[in-house]
Image (cartoon, rainbow, N blue to C red):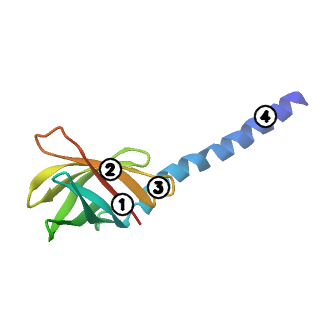
Amino acid sequence: MFKSFCLMFLIAGCQTAPQKRTSYENWQSKVTGIYKGIIFSDEIESPGITKIYKDANGNFKGDYEFIDKEAKIAGTLYDFQVISPLQLKCRWRDKYGTGDLSMSFNNSVTKFNGSWNADGKEKKYPWNGTK
């Protein structure tokens, strides 16, 4: 009797384990969208919009814009990498140059806190957004 109970418990436990893993896999499908937030530029908080989408091959791509000295600056996001669950890294490019952007999303994938740096520079600046 005890052996049958243990066997049933193990079988039930094995059947529920994949559901937790699936929820982590699904976070990537929720990343796409438009995020409004702040992008620091030249030590100044600038209102910004970050758009993340998938191309025809299912790869993440993105665009962004922010206001800098009363002019709108537009850029692109590319070479996305999944670092770990709820964390992405990508490259950015705009008229000022290129660099890295790291993003950490909340559990509901409705906002991210990130940081960016320019190529050849160690100093990082905040970049965040909320859907």
- Horizontal and vertical percent position of residue 17: 63, 43
Total marks shown come to: 4
- Residue at far right of view: 1
Spatial distance from mark 2 to mark 1, Cα to Cα? Answer: 9 Å
Task: Name the residue beneath numbered marker 4.
Answer: 7
Identify residue type, mark 2. Gly
Q: Are marks 4 and 3 in contact (CB under 8 Å)?
A: no
Q: For the residue labelled by badge 3, is the local secondary structure a helix, a strand or a loop?
A: helix
- Horizontal and vertical percent position of residue 25: 48, 51
Counting residues from the start of the chain, the first of labels 2 and 4 encountered is: 4
Task: Name the residue beneath numbered marker 1.
Answer: 129
Q: For the residue labelled by badge 4, is the local secondary structure a helix, a strand or a loop?
A: helix
Task: Name the residue beneath numbered marker 2.
Answer: 114
What residue is rendered at 78% in x and 34% in y?
7
Q: Nearer the viewer, mark 2 or mark 4?
A: 2
- Horizontal and vertical percent position of residue 52: 32, 64
Q: Is residue 55 above or below residue 81?
A: below
Instruction: Tell me the quarter of the image containing the C terminus.
Output: bottom left
Q: Is residue 6 left or right of residue 29?
A: right
Task: Name the residue beneath numbered marker 3.
Answer: 27
Q: Is residue 111 left or right of residue 46?
A: right
Q: For the residue labelled by badge 2, is the local secondary structure a helix, a strand or a loop?
A: strand
